[in-house]
Amino acid sequence: MEITRTVLLAAFATAFVLAFVFSPVAIRLAPKIGAMDIPKDSRRMHTKAMPRFGGLAIFIGTTISLLIFGGQNDKVVPVLIGGTLIYILGVVDDLKNLDPKVKFAGQFVVAVLMYYMGLRIRFITNYFGDGTLHFGTAVCFIVTVLWIVGITNTINLIDGLDGLAAGTAAIASLCIAYIAYIHGDEYGMMIVCLAMVSVAGGCLGFLPFNFYPAKIFMGDGGSLFLGFMIAAMSVVGPLKQSTVIAVVLPVIVLGIPIFDTFFAIFRRLINRRPIMEADKGHLHHHLMALGYGQRRAVLMLYGISAIMGMAAVLVSRELFKDAVVLIGIAGIYLYVFLTDPNHKMPHIKAVNIAKEERQQEKKVAETEKKEDGKEKDSL
């Protein structure tokens, strides 16, 4: 099937509608199978048990759309197999709370499988000279596995506020899809564009149920699936023609989650804590601590993600100076968010005047009663 604009729109619409339809199904199904997120520590932003099975809707929407419109492409088949395995791993984690080491081992196995199914990063562009830097077999294996495992976890690590992971993944997917569309004819990347619009459709179909106040969370099944799809599809691109477009640009598009991931690793190493241990030091936690609230914090991170996405588009068109300006702006915002702990947004507290008056009258009456008791004792 030729991938035209009509096909792309149909793939997006199919993924969107399926995710939108299956989100309420996931909400009803979650408590029956025990896929509930119960707040057990201060790191959680919610105060009541929430369904965390929304990844089902994203998975169904994305995979069915890809099967319908791109299933005949031999490059899509291994990605769908890997995506299904990663999704199952995430669902098991949602139900059983797997040890982080076990979950990491599962991701490593899937990444190795993808390598042996032909998804490989064989070289990178040589920015310090002409041509490219080709990898040997060992280096190719290490780089590919680290890339897939690393990017797979980026979406999972930022999934801490209502709508943050779904919206960020949608923005990243649409930016990558646009870049692939721009260069599709020249580099044969239209299949990447098709896959990314399907992922974006799945995210946006789920987002109405996940945005603040959320009715359901995507869970690790959804976040790991989204991260894997972005990682794998960036490797699917024909690397012999354009490694920069296929691999480097997703790093720019995913600037926020990747930065947050490295910042979390560095923070835990400094504090001598396990790297895979969850904490409350992520960027979205900083914004919440500053008093912005979930809705504002998420919208602010959407904005920075969009800036990074546009920077990636400019890089793909070799407008490097323009891209540097946008990346610099995003960096300034990150600096402000992470280095201004004394800033507090004003909290406006509604006061029940009648209740306050009754409490004040009660205090006055108690004071008078004590004074009367003292007078009687003195007599």
Image (spheres, rainbow, N blue to C red):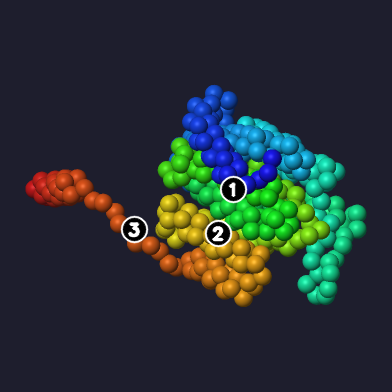
- Asked if the residue under mark 2 is in contact with the one under mark 3, i.e. CB atoms within 8 Å, the reply is no
Amino acid at circle 1 = Arg
Label 3 – label 2 distance at C-alpha = 27 Å
- Asked if the residue under mark 2 is in contact with the one under mark 1, i.e. CB atoms within 8 Å, the reply is no
Q: Nearer the viewer, mark 3 or mark 2?
A: 2
Q: Above or below — where is 190 with respect to 317?
A: above
Crowding near the residue tagged with mark 2, few <14, some 14–19, many ≥20 C-alpha atoms within 10 Å: many
Percent position (x, y) of residue 183?
68, 59
Query: Does residue 210 appear to the left or right of 66 in the view shown?
Result: left
Label 1 – label 2 distance at C-alpha = 25 Å
Q: Which residue is mark 1?
A: 5
Q: Which residue is mark 3?
A: 347
Name the element at disc 1.
helix
Name the element at disc 3.
loop
Which quarter of the figure has residue 140?
bottom right
Q: Quadrant of the N terminus?
A: top right
Amino acid at circle 3 = His
Q: Which residue is mark 2?
A: 305
Crowding near the residue tagged with mark 3, few <14, some 14–19, many ≥20 C-alpha atoms within 10 Å: few
| Farthest residue, direction left | 379
* Picture residue at 64% right of the left edge, 58% below the top: 182
